Image (cartoon, helix red, strand yellow):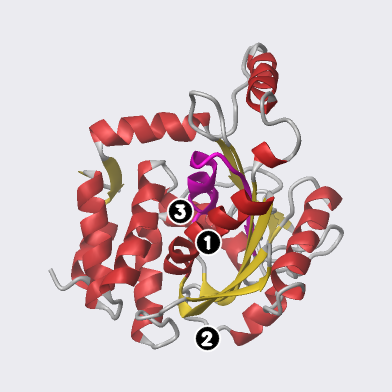
């Protein structure tokens, strides 16, 4: 497979032009292109330009509202509800961020409940901006049913990613973003595209047998990491992003899917906490940095997100590599 190298500016232009040409207005195209570019910049190819054709399919068939205007309502002093107007999640997240930050600073804790959004991006861009403003942040969402509960062989949960961000002193925020499945579905899709074999334990084929064939796993089911532990976290996320805010559970997301391969409508929870409001305003930063230092004193240990930041620095200088075939497909989508 032949790759080409693009600058980050070229990545964003590709994404923006394709979205604008296929039904997005400027605001939605810009917000979504920003997310796609951040994913490519940080080495998350499974959530970068790879996702763009799927967005376009759903825009063209009318499932996605490319001209969505998110609406923000206050339900309680610490709760805002953001109706995404059936648009791509990125704009709803961007437009509600200021209100979430302000409320967290006012009272220590704030939660944004995002509804009627279509989310198919990485979650770390949802929490890192909050940590850059000095807040601790947690985000989670659900997806179509792809993951079997522990002990089962049929899908029930989505891959249900969870992201956490912590502000640091004189360093980028510590951020992790992980699915409840052993491997994110997008990574399995890329493995299938590129002809790679999966590690043991990622998933089962359609007959319920363990498989390292990515196509067989895509036709079968993913497994939760850590068995019952990952399964329990998947269940918690279902309760918070569906049961709590009246959005669809993963089986309901799948039942409503039109099968176009694009994103599906669902909910998201973003929690912001202001560490200055929890009783250790003068000491929490130094205290946490001491803990991080002890962690890093062990050979081979790194903080979550360190490799992502290294890839980010490299991409700013070297650009990013994408398959030539994907580049050609995206140019066709944008009418170039």
Q: Residue, x 59% and y 23% (percent of image)?
A: 302
**Circle 1: is it few (<14), some (14-19), or many (20+) Cα within 10 Å?**
some
**Circle 3: is it few (<14), some (14-19), or many (20+) Cα within 10 Å?**
many
Residue 46's tag is: 3
Camera-near label (2 vs 1) is: 1
Residue 244 occupies quadrant: bottom right
Circle 1 residue: 99
Q: Residue, x 51% and y 57% (percent of image)?
A: 186
Compare marks 2 and 3 and give the one earlier in the sequence. Answer: 3
Q: Nearer the viewer, residue 234 or 182?
A: 234
Residue 42's tag is: none
Camera-near label (3 vs 1) is: 1
Residue 55 occupies quadrant: bottom left
Q: Residue, x 65% and y 11% (percent of image)?
A: 297
CA distance separating discs 2 and 3: 22 Å
Seen in the image, is 26 located left or right of residue 258?
Answer: left
Residue 258's tag is: 2
Seen in the image, is 15 located left or right of residue 121?
Answer: left
């Amino acid at each position: 497979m032949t790759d080409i190298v693009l600058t980050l500016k070229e990545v964003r232009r590709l994404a923006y032009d394709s979205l604008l040409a296929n039904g997005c207005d400027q605001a939605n195209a810009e917000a979504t292109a920003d997310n796609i570019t951040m994913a490519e910049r940080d080495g998350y190819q499974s959530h970068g330009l790879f996702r763009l054709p799927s967005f376009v399919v759903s825009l063209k068939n009318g499932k996605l509202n490319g001209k969505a205007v998110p609406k923000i309502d206050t339900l309680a002093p610490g709760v805002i509800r953001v109706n995404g107007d059936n648009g791509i999640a990125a704009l709803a997240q961007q437009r509600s961020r200021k209100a979430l930050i302000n409320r967290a600073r006012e009272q220590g804790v704030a939660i944004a409940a995002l509804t009627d959004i279509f989310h198919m991006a990485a979650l770390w861009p949802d929490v890192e901006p909050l940590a850059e403003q000095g807040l601790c942040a947690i985000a989670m969402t659900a997806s179509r049913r792809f993951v079997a509960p522990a002990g089962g062989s049929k899908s029930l949960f989505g891959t249900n990613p969870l992201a956490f961000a912590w502000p640091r002193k004189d360093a980028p925020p510590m951020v992790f973003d992980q699915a409840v499945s052993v491997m994110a579905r997008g990574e399995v899709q890329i493995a299938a595209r590129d002809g790679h074999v999966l590690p043991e334990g990622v998933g089962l084929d359609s007959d319920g047998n363990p498989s390292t064939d990515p196509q067989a796993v895509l036709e079968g089911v993913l497994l939760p990491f850590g068995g019952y532990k990952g399964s329990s976290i998947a269940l918690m996320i279902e309760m918070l992003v569906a049961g709590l805010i009246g959005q669809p559970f993963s089986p309901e997301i799948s039942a409503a899917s039109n099968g176009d391969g694009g994103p599906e409508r669902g909910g998201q929870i973003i929690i912001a906490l202001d560490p200055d409001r929890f009783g250790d305003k003068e000491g929490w930063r130094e205290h946490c940095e001491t803990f991080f230092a002890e962690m890093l004193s062990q050979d081979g240990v790194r903080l979550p997100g360190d490799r992502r930041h290294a890839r980010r620095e490299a991409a700013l200088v070297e650009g990013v590599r994408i398959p030539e075939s994907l580049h050609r497909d995206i140019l066709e989508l944008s009418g170039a």
